[in-house]
Amino acid sequence: MLRFLYALLCLSSFFGICAERATISGFGNIGAVHSNSDTYRFRTDISRDNDNFEDSLDFSAISSLGIQADISLFRDFDLVTQLIYRGQKKVTLDNALSLAFLRYKPAPDWELRVGRTQLDLYLLTEYRDIGFAYPWAKVPTEVYALLPYRNLDGADFTYFKSHNDLDYRIKLFGGQSSSHIALDNENVELKIDDVLGVSFELSQFDWTLSLKHTQARTKNNISTMASIIGGLQQIPDVIWPDKAAFINDFSLINKKAYFSSAGLKYNLGPLTFLTEFAHLHSDSSVVSAVSSGYISTTYNFDKGQLFYTFAIVESDPSEFNDAVNIQRFLPNQVEEIILAVNESFRVFSPNQQTHSLGVRYDVKDNIALKLQIDHTNIEAQGGALWSYQGMNTLAPKESFTTLFFSVSFTF
Amino acid sequence: MNTAVAKPISIVVHADNATDSLSKKQLIDLYMGRYVAFPDNQSAQPLDTLTPEGLKSTFYKRLVNMPLSRVNAYWSRVRFTGRATPPETYADEQMVLNFIAENPNAIGYVFSDALTKQQKQKQKVKVILELYE
């Protein structure tokens, strides 16, 4: 697939010179984050490295720069490519290429895109890295930080219909994706394939109702899961009759994951209301059922926006119910394995709430200044969305404040 | 006083375009990349213009009641997710009218008084909607 994407990138370079209409544009965000917690450090999502514990002012967490080429090829065909830098430690073509697709649009009401597109899991996932597009300094952590995936290598089909002042848009998409997940001291890859999704939007210009559902198959175990499973398999069946079923549930290999979201945006005079509820669960016991949501109110005035957002995420991590019984027979041999299993159960199990208050002011038509203050309450063992150095099972309950300042721009 | 605020704005297309009138909702769909086609399903090519001063900002204020910075914020999420590209921008009203005169699927906007000064161009373009304050 990467070869195909590379070919699209080369094509876009070639046609960018030759094409009748080629436009280059871009976007960026320069931001600083400061938190008064010594335990947790902010990160936009769980793919961001878990190592920024030395600086109290973080300039990389919400900073990004993207450049895009839109190229009209022939009648009905166009190419779009986009590269983005958002603090990757090692920049590669694969992790910097966020869009590279060929679009076929023979009629105004439908289109087919093939190549790399942005993964349309929840309401804001497609443009969460484009700071100029929204009023906040960053999208709500509670809903979006658990989603490391950004791109879909595959195809999508969109159909649009306008009827009786209502607009209907339905998008079907399929393909595969890959992302890294930053754990305690390592960064591991988790691939998903057989991604199948549907996105439905019903709207007028003043409001949009959005419903999305995607299912995907995780392809590999992460970090020490393989060795944990190896250790569990050593426990005799007579001590642990449910061993096979437990191990099967524990593994991430070939397990379905399900992402669902319902969102509503409504403009009422100078006010904009935005709310979304999202749910994630998996057939693997490692990924607990996670429910999250936010409600945001924005007051629009002249060139400014004042906003308040409340966001919450709740999850119910799996428990190793047979641990007590096994430990009775093999206390010394299994203690570390049981600890490791419980640790794995908390990698994808956040529990926290945040109140956010902030302002955006557009100093020019394409430059915005943003200031945002967050007050976050993290439950014990619930800080999975943050950079945290230590065992998840020992992560403390904490309340703290985080300050964001950024300059967002387009060109 | 900003005179641009009070002047009517004409939405113009090629004289041979099958569309004779457009609703404001259809114009919003066209200019905001939602459904870039005329009512007969023919693809459209919307145009923006940089001058005269105040025309573009007045047009979008009347169309969607937003300042240009919020229109740009809207377009940044449409454009950078690969959904659609914003209208092509021309330097002035005359260039917009010239382009429309040569392209039956183009659509643009000018201050209505610019058309009365351009009777020759008016032969090739027609007004399908007027936006008032």
Image (cartoon, coloured by chain):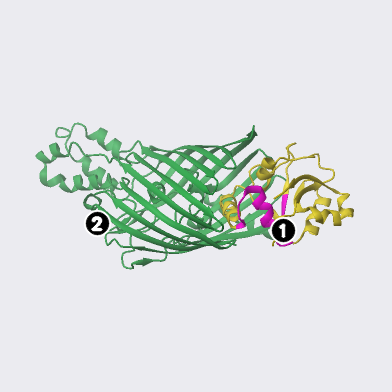
Chain colours: A green, B yellow
Q: Horizontal and vertical percent for residue A391?
A: 24, 53
In magenta stretch: residue B60: yes
On whether disc 2 and disc 1 are found on a single subunit, the reply is no
Between disc 2 and disc 1, the foreground one is 1
On screen, residue A178 above or below A283? below
Which of the two residues, B112 or A204, is positioned nearer the viewer here? B112
Question: Is residue A231 found left or right of B86 in the rendered image?
Answer: left
Q: Which residue has dot 1 on it? A: B4
Which of the two residues, A234 or A390, is positioned nearer the viewer here? A390
Identify the image quadrant of residue A36.
bottom left
Residue at mark 2 to residue at mark 1: CA–CA distance: 62 Å
Q: Horizontal and vertical percent for residue A31?
A: 45, 64
Question: Is residue A217 found left or right of A101 in the rendered image?
Answer: left
Which of the two residues, A315 or A337, is positioned nearer the viewer here? A315
CA neighbours of label 1 inside 10 A, class few (<14), some (14 to 19), many (20+): some
Q: Name the residue rendered at 62%, 37% in the picture.
A: A160
Q: Horizontal and vertical percent for residue A123?
A: 49, 44
Identify the image quadrant of residue B44.
top right
Which quarter shows the C terminus of chain A? bottom right
Name the chain letter of the residue that bears numbered label 1.
B
On screen, residue A379 above or below A10? above
Per the image, label 1 sits on a secondary structure element best described as helix
CA neighbours of label 2 inside 10 A, class few (<14), some (14 to 19), many (20+): few
Q: Horizontal and vertical percent for residue A263?
A: 47, 40
Q: Amino acid at mark 1?
A: Ala
Q: Which residue has dot 2 on it? A: A390
Asked if the residues shown at circle 2 and circle 1 are in contact, with their CB atoms under 8 angstroms apart, the answer is no
- Would you say residue A19 is visible in this rendering? no
- Would you say residue B71 is visible in this rendering? yes
Q: How many marks?
A: 2
The part of the chain drawn in magenta is B46-68
Q: Name the residue rendered at 62%, 50% in the picture.
A: B65
